[in-house]
Image (tube, rainbow, N blue to C red):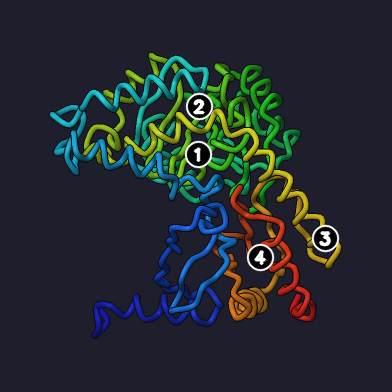
Amino acid sequence: MTQNKFDFIDRALAERVEQQQFRSLQPLVPVVSQSPDTRSNRVWVWKQGRKLLNFSSNDYLGLSKHPALIEAAQAYTSQYGTGATASRLVVGNYDIYHQLEEKLAIACGREAALLFSSGFQANMTLLGTLLTSQSCVLCDRLIHSSLIQGILASGARFYRYAHNDLNHLETLLKKGSSQPFDRLMIVTETVFSMDGDRSDIAALIELANQHNAILYLDDAHALGVMGKQGMGLAAFHPEIDLVVGTFGKAFGAFGAFVACSQKMREYLINCCPGFIYTTALPPAVIGAIDAALTLIPDLDEERQHLMNQSKTLRDRLQKMGYSTLNSDSQIVPMMVGESAKTLELSQALEAEAILAVAIRSPTVPKGSARIRLTLSSQHQPEHLNMLVQALSSFITLI
C-alpha cells in the first residue's frame, strides 16, 4: 500500500503533461448583442476579456441563440416548472415528452422515438441493454468514445473494421455468422465526429440484412444538417434498427433520442436502465427541442450555405498544404500530426482572435492531432477570410 492513497492521480496527471495530453477547462461567454445582424453575433465568444471568432462549436445552424428556442424554453418552464421531478416511469412523464417523441418519429420516418438525457448516456445504456457477453459487435475503428464505452460495458466481444472499409466489415461478418454468438451488431456513425467523412448507409443496410445483424447508427453530426428535411442521413430508412440522434449540436439544445420500431421502444422502456432510472429532461429543454424541430425542415438555404462554406474552407486549406482527410461535411479536420505543434498552432490562432481547439490523443489516434474546424451556417465569407489570413502567417508550424 502506498503512503498516499491518491498517488495514482499524480501519476496520471504527470503522464498527461508529459504526453501533451493535459487538458483544463477554459471559461467562455457567448457574445450577446441587440444588433439585428444576429447571424454574425452567434459565432463569437468572449474568453478572458478577448473577443474570439469561434470555429470549434457544434452549433451547426446557430439555433442555440435563436429567439424561437429561447421563447419556447421560457414558455415550457412557466407551464411545467424547471424540472420533471422524477423518472418517466414514476411521475415525470409529462405529456410534452410523448408529443415530442411522436413528432420526432414522424420527422425521421420511423414508427417510434424515445428520449434520452444525452448522446453519451444514450449510447452507453442502449448498447448495454441490447448486447450480452455472448454477443459480437463489429464497429468502425473511428467510432466515438461513447459507443466504445457502451460496448465495453456490455461485455460483448467486439472487433474493429478498418475505417469505412466495408470489405473488411463483410469479412468479419462472415466469420461472426459462423460462430455461436447470440446476436451480431454493426455499430458506426453516419458522419464521423473527428474526420468529417460519411458512412455508406445503403451498403451498411445491405450487409446487415445479408448477415441478419442489428444495425446501430449514431447520426449525431448529420442530424439537422443533412438528409431529407435535415433529419439526418439515417432518416427514412426503416431497415436501420436503431438510430441515435442528439440535440446538443444542430438542434442547439440538449439531450438525445433513439428512432426505432414500436416494439423496440417498448423493450427499451422496460429493459434499459439509462431510461428507467433517470429523471426526465427538464421542460425548458423539451421546449427548445420542439421549437428547433419546427424550424429545421425549412432551413434548406442555411444547410446549403453551410455546405458551400465548408467546401470553400476545405479547398482553401488544401491549397495551403493542409490535409483535410476525406471530409465532406461541416467538420473540417486540419491535420498537423504532432500534439505539441497542434497546440502551438491553436495558441497562435487564438492570438489572432481565432478560437480553434487542438484535438489530440486519446480523442484521435496518436500522430493524428489536428485542429478540428466546425462550421456553422452563421459563418460568413469574411469569417473564413479571417481564419485563412491568420493561418497564412503560421505555415511553418505544420
| C-alpha gap between disc 4 and disc 2 | 38 Å
Front-most of residues 158 and 163: 163
Dot 1 falls on a residue whose secondary structure is strand
Q: Residues within 10 Å of mark 3 (few under 14, many from 20)?
A: few
Question: Is residue 145 placed above or below 361 in the rendered structure?
Answer: above
The type of residue carrying mark 4 is Arg
Badge nearest the viewer, 1 or 3: 3
Quadrant containing the N terminus is bottom left
x%, y% of residue 353?
59, 75
| C-alpha gap between disc 3 and disc 4 | 14 Å
The type of residue carrying mark 2 is Phe
| C-alpha gap between disc 1 and disc 4 | 31 Å
Q: Are marks 1 and 2 in contact (CB under 8 Å)?
A: yes
| Residue located 62% across and 30% down the image | 233
Q: Which mark is residue 318?
A: 3
Of the residues under marks 1 and 4, which one precedes in the sequence?
1
| Residue located 62% across and 46% down the image | 192
x%, y% of residue 290?
38, 31
Q: Which mark is residue 181?
A: 2
